Image (tube, rainbow, N blue to C red):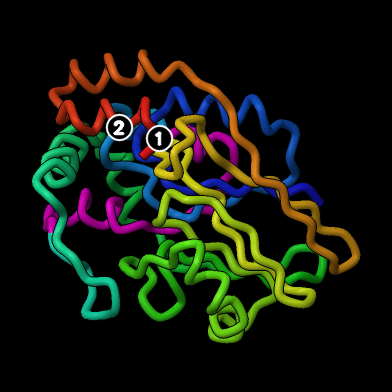
Amino acid sequence: MRLLVVSDIHSNHIALRAVLDDAAPWDRCICAGDTVGYGPDPNECIDALRDNGFRCIRGNHDHEVITGDASSPEGAPGNFRFNPRAARAIKINRGLLTPDSRAYLEGLPTSLRLKVDGVNIAVYHGSPRAPLSEYIMPEEAKMRAAQLIAESECTFLVLGHTHKPYAIEHGDALLLNPGSVGQPRDGDPRASYALVEIAEGKINSYIHRVKYDIKRTQEKMKRRGLPKTLATRLGRGR
């Protein structure tokens, strides 16, 4: 079984198309949240996920785009308020959504559990204890892998939110963050995603990077009136 795992697309349809073309073929696909926000094409990204059969959860930006409340969504670790640039992007994305896209986001759960070839998989945007808000950065993930996997009661745990990829093995279990498709923050501007091979209960993961036309996305962001700093950071990957 070949599983495609993505997260933090952030309305960057050009980057998402590059990932889908680069990753094909796959058997099943998962998105760990934040399909919208920051970028210029929320409806196109949602359509691409639906057309390709992704199982998807809600991220904090998805939540704020549909609620219109740019404050922390839950009283749990990692609470924050969106900075003015992110809040403006949320407002613009909210205005761009079609009724169908809004209904799709409203229907997304905040976590996902599924079983693939005997492997129990759990998916959260933030963490098991704070699905929408807690950042589990790479160094913390290394220290807390056993705890996080135990909390989620799974063999394969997928997180997003940090925009930084990692894959941490703990015995036969795996803690994976595929990084960000639409706005990487690890110093590499290429879109990030993961491919996971599952066979006979064994899990092998591979983080992939793919170039996309960053300038085209930046130009679309400018036309949408999105903050210039959000476009500039795409070229830096941080």
Whether label 2 touches label 1, CB < 8 Å: yes
- The structure residue drawn at horizontal position 54% and vertical position 85%, both measured from the top left corner, is 151
- Tell me if residue 139 comes above or below residue 88 in the rendering: below
- For disc 2, the neighbor class at 10 Å (few under 14, some 14 to 19, many from 20) is some
Check disc 2 and report its element: helix, strand or loop.
helix
Check disc 1 and report its element: helix, strand or loop.
loop
- 205 and 23: which one is in front? 205
Is 225 on the left-hand or right-hand side of 93?
Answer: left
Please, what is the three-letter code of the amino acid marked with disc 1?
Gly
User: Residue 118's spot in the image, x, y percent?
Assistant: 81, 71
- 142 and 30: which one is in front? 142
Which image quadrant: the C terminus? top left
- Tell me if residue 17 comes above or below residue 9 in the rendering: above
- For disc 1, the neighbor class at 10 Å (few under 14, some 14 to 19, many from 20) is some
- 39 and 167: which one is in front? 167
Residue furthest right in the image: 200
Q: What stretch is highlighted in magenta?
A: 47-70
User: Residue 10's spot in the image, x, y percent?
Assistant: 35, 40
Q: Name the residue under label 1.
A: 237
**Residue 175 forms part of the magenta stretch:** no
**Residue 64 forms part of the magenta stretch:** yes
Q: Mark 2 points at which residue?
A: 233
- Tell me if residue 198 comes above or below residue 99 in the rendering: below
- The structure residue drawn at horizontal position 63% and vertical position 25%, both measured from the top left corner, is 21
- 183 and 141: which one is in front? 141
- Tell me if residue 1 comes above or below residue 159 in the rendering: above
- The structure residue drawn at horizontal position 52% and vertical position 70%, both measured from the top left corner, is 141
Using the numbered discs, state the Cα–Cα distance from disc 2 to disc 1 in whole angstroms: 6 Å
Is 26 on the left-hand or right-hand side of 175?
Answer: right
Please, what is the three-letter code of the amino acid marked with disc 2?
Arg
